[in-house]
Image (spheres, helix red, strand yellow):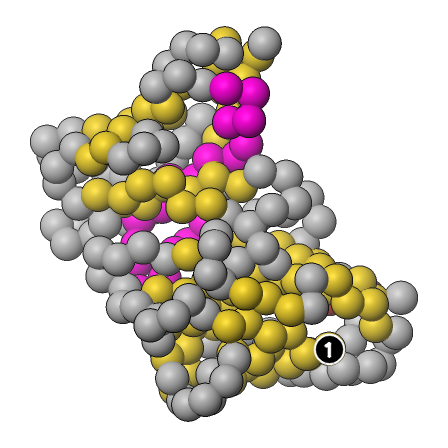
Amino acid sequence: NAGVMQNPRHLVRRRGQEARLRCSPMKGHSHVYWYRQLPEEGLKFMVYLQKENIIDESGMPKERFSAEFPKEGPSILRIQQVVRGDSAAYFCASSPQVSGNTIYFGEGSWLTVV
Amino acid sequence: DAKTTQPTSMDCAEGRAANLPCNHSTISGNEYVYWYRQIHSQGPQYIIHGLKNNETNEMASLIITEDRKSSTLILPHATLRDTAVYYCIVLLNEKLTFGTGTRLTIIP
């Protein structure tokens, strides 16, 4: 897991507020993934991004959720108007390119909505 | 989709080899098999991956059958810290799709 940095590690938001989760991929990695893990459940794919492009967002909820990976800076997962059901661990992963290469995960960001 | 099937849970005695099986009978020729594990409340940890040949690293060995329809992850000398959920994943459409994995418990 070394190298993929996520922050904040823990975030508490009131219902209706916005949550922003940041992910800095490993050096040299241009592919970023976001996963969500609800309490006592498995990891669910949300979105796959390359620099400035969303490649696959098939796992993203249709509303309130968005992700970006700008040319400069970290990838951002943004959740607007959070609800209690958004409380989960959000994991970011990165790789230099996909086929045959290792995809490394960060330690996650825990969002609690109160 | 090349899905995987793993036993729900397994126990292994400390110091023994842990052999975790995985079936992926619909795997395509260019799809890699990846293994990750997740220790409670931590991020998934990469273990090993392979395409056709058996692979070994400092953590584990991966044995892939000749027809590639199944594989086995081997932890040669299991320790208590190896207690975790282990995921066997076929990389599909450039993303890892996690199943329910195998909950491995190392018994003292």
Taking the spot 76% from the left edge, 82% from the top edge, the residue there is: A18
Q: Which chain carries label 1?
A: A
Q: How many marks?
A: 1
Left or right position of B11 against A31:
right
Left or right position of A75 against B22:
right
Taking the spot 45% from the left edge, 70% from the top edge, the residue there is: A25
Q: Residues within 10 Å of mark 1 (few under 14, many from 20)?
A: many
What is the quadrant of the N terminus of chain B in the image? bottom left
Q: Position of residue A54 (x, y in %)?
A: 41, 83
Observer-nearest residue: B97 or B80? B80
Q: Where is residue A15 in the image (x, y as percent from the top left)?
A: 86, 75
Q: Is residue A11 magenta?
A: no
Q: Where is residue A23 in the image (x, y as percent from the top left)?
A: 54, 72
Left or right position of B10 against A107:
left
Observer-nearest residue: A106 or B25? A106
Q: Where is residue B97 in the image (x, y as percent from the top left)?
A: 42, 54
What is the quadrant of the C terminus of chain B in the image? top right
Magenta stretch? B79-99
Q: What residue type is labelled 1?
A: Ala
Q: Does the magenta stretch include residue B84?
A: yes
Left or right position of A75 against A85:
left
Taking the spot 56% from the left edge, 60% from the top edge, the residue there is: A91
**Which residue, given by chain and number where applicable, does mark 1 sit on?**
A19
**Numbered disc 1: secondary structure:** strand
Image position of A79 with respect to B63: above or below: below
Image position of B105 with respect to A18: above or below: above
Residue B80 shows in the view: yes
Residue B22 shows in the view: no
Image position of B25 with respect to A91: above or below: above
Image position of A46 with respect to B39: above or below: below
Taking the spot 32% from the left edge, 33% from the top edge, the residue there is: B58
